[in-house]
Amino acid sequence: MLTGKEIMHVRVIDARMTRPANPQALAKKLPGKKISGVTRRGKYLCLELDDGDMMIIHLRMTGVLTFVEKGASQSNWPHLSLILEFTDGDSLVFQDQRRFGTAALLTAPEAASLFDRLGPEPLTRSFGAVQLARLVRNRKRPVKSLLLDQGVIAGIGNIYADEALFRAWIHPLREAGSLNEAEVKRLSGAIKSTLRDAIKLEGSSISNYRSALGRRGRFQETFRVHRRQGEPCPGCGGSVEKIRVGGRGTYFCPACQKVTPG
Ligand SMILES: [Zn+2]
């Protein structure tokens, strides 16, 4: 969809998006570069450029990227933050209701040093119970906080951490190092299945203009505990509760997710 396209023009509508860099710097440097590949690393979407540089976009909580074909209208789109226009008339539009999303242009060494700090990718083949057991070993922090730490495992956001812990029947406040072998195995499987379901329902990080509206929010409809406090748990019918773990709103079922190893 994007590979091979040449950037003609960059419109930074919300200057906060490129902080601390000046939006004009990004707008000046990008035109003329061609996209040679699109990858994902952790929570970053990476546009690889033909000169070795990389444009990275972090969607944060409410960011949405939409590919817009030539001729389709972009007027009256709410919360526009950034638009990349290509020489063939297509464009890539970034909308962000809460405006926490970021974009940056990095050199190859800068990108490498950023990604060196990220933990392993949970959807790779090498990630599994063995690797997760190594990552939680002797960790005193609550397992939920550990899952959110991008330096430990890359790419698990707040929603996915809640949903994975529910699927694995593990209480979010359990000390990570206290998980037994069976729990680690359940959790590694739950992380993979949660992320896979999210990708299946929301498509790739970039939705197409024509299908964007219909597709948006479908994973949200499948949340089992996240943002469902007071509603019945899909496992036992009891009430879903909300607490805070490491400052993040955390949803779980106190009956299904035990505080003690199980
Ligand atoms: Zn339950």
Image: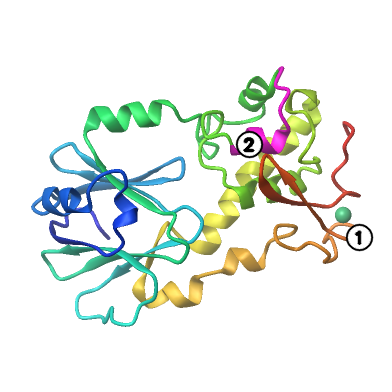
- Looking at the rendering, the quadrant in which ligand 1 lies is bottom right
Q: Residues within 10 Å of mark 2 (few under 14, many from 20)?
A: many
For mark 1, give the secondary structure: loop
In the rendered image, the residue lying farthest to the left is: 32
Marks 1/2: CA distance?
25 Å
- Residue at disc 2, CB closer than 8 Å to ligand 1: no
Does the magenta segment cover residue 149?
no
Residue located beneath label 1 in the image: 238
Q: In the image, which disc is placed on residue 195?
A: none
- Residue at disc 1, CB closer than 8 Å to ligand 1: yes
Measuring 16% from the left and 48% from the top, which residue is drawn there?
25
Residue located beneath label 2 in the image: 147
**Where does residue 256 sit, x and y in percent of width and height?**
87, 48
Is 82 above or below relative to 37? below
**Where does residue 60 sit, x and y in percent of width and height?**
47, 52
What is the quadrant of residue 176 in the picture?
Answer: top right
In depth, the one of 146 and 86 nearer the eye is: 146
Measuring 80% from the left and 30% from the top, which residue is drawn there?
182
> Which range of residues does the magenta coloring cover?
138-148
Is 244 above or below relative to 200? above
Q: Amino acid at mark 2?
A: Leu
**Where does residue 143 sit, x and y in percent of width and height?**
71, 34
Q: Residues within 10 Å of mark 1 (few under 14, many from 20)?
A: some
Is 200 above or below relative to 108? below
Does the magenta segment cover residue 146?
yes
Q: Amino acid at mark 1?
A: Gly
In depth, the one of 207 and 85 nearer the eye is: 85
For mark 2, give the secondary structure: helix
